[in-house]
Image (cartoon, rainbow, N blue to C red):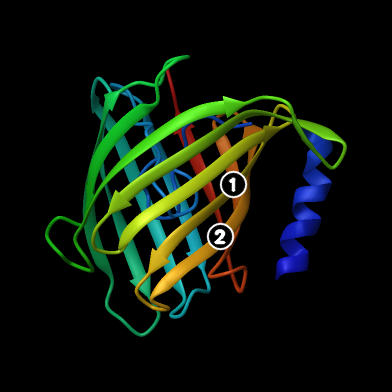
Amino acid sequence: MRSLLLALCLSLVAAGAAGAAPSFNGYTGLLLVPNADALDQDEFNLAAFSTDITPRTDVFSFQYGVGTRLEAGAARIHAKGSDRETVLMAKYAITPETERKAGVAVGVYDPFDEIEATAYVSASKTWGRNLRVFEKEITSVRGTVGFGGGSLDGFYLGLSGALGERLLLLAELVHTQRSNTHDFNAGARLNIGQGLRLHGALFDNLSDFGFGLSYNKMR
């Protein structure tokens, strides 16, 4: 699976990054880590994800911008061997990112504890524009740091960077209760046009694979 994702990333480099898009949990973010973005009023996204993290889990999510920098939505989650669950979520970008200041957002995931109630706060800031990989320049390099309870279980870190005009590379460190340690996740998000994005990721120190498709309707 790891070689498959690497091959996908390499093949898409020439195609050319994507803006705010759903994470594998539904809220806007990286892979599992929420960033400081939130959908604006009347924006929305739809997504379908599947991961082979034990147990294999399929997620169908919908998020809607119910107000200025405020998103809310739901996800239908099916873990193999378990009943399907519907979880709600909401996220508010308290402070938008500026050239000098980081953006800050707070959110809640599964407030009724259908799977695991989670609250979090995230800060994100673009901090570099001149890195290179695969002989290509990475632009809009952005770091995210935050703290959450529940499924996020402590401090987390995230990093993203656009490789060309369509490809976004993602990496993060997030604590998991399964391993009781911080795991490294990495992936890519390809903007294929008309609001559609392909998602690919390796989770749990690159040992588990995930993929998905999302549609964003932005202003």
| Rendered-image quadrant of the C terminus | top left
Q: Mark 2 and mark 1: span between their CA atoms?
A: 8 Å
Find residue 185 and name its label: 2
List x then y, in percent, for residue 60. 39, 56
- Residue type at mark 1? Leu
The part of the image, by quadrant, that contains residue 113 is bottom left
Residue at x 19%, y 61% (from the top left corner): 117
Residue 145 in picture, x, y percent from top left: 41, 43
Q: What amino acid is at disc 2?
A: Asn
Query: Neighbour class for label 1 at 10 Å: few (<14), some, many (≥20)?
Result: many
Q: Which circle marks residue 170 in the picture?
A: 1
| Residue 81 numbered tag | none
Residue lying furthest left: 112
Instruction: For the residues labelled 2 and 1, say whether their Cβ atoms are less than 8 Å apart.
Output: yes
SS type, badge 2:
strand
- Of the numbered discs 2 and 1, the one sitting upstream in the chain is 1
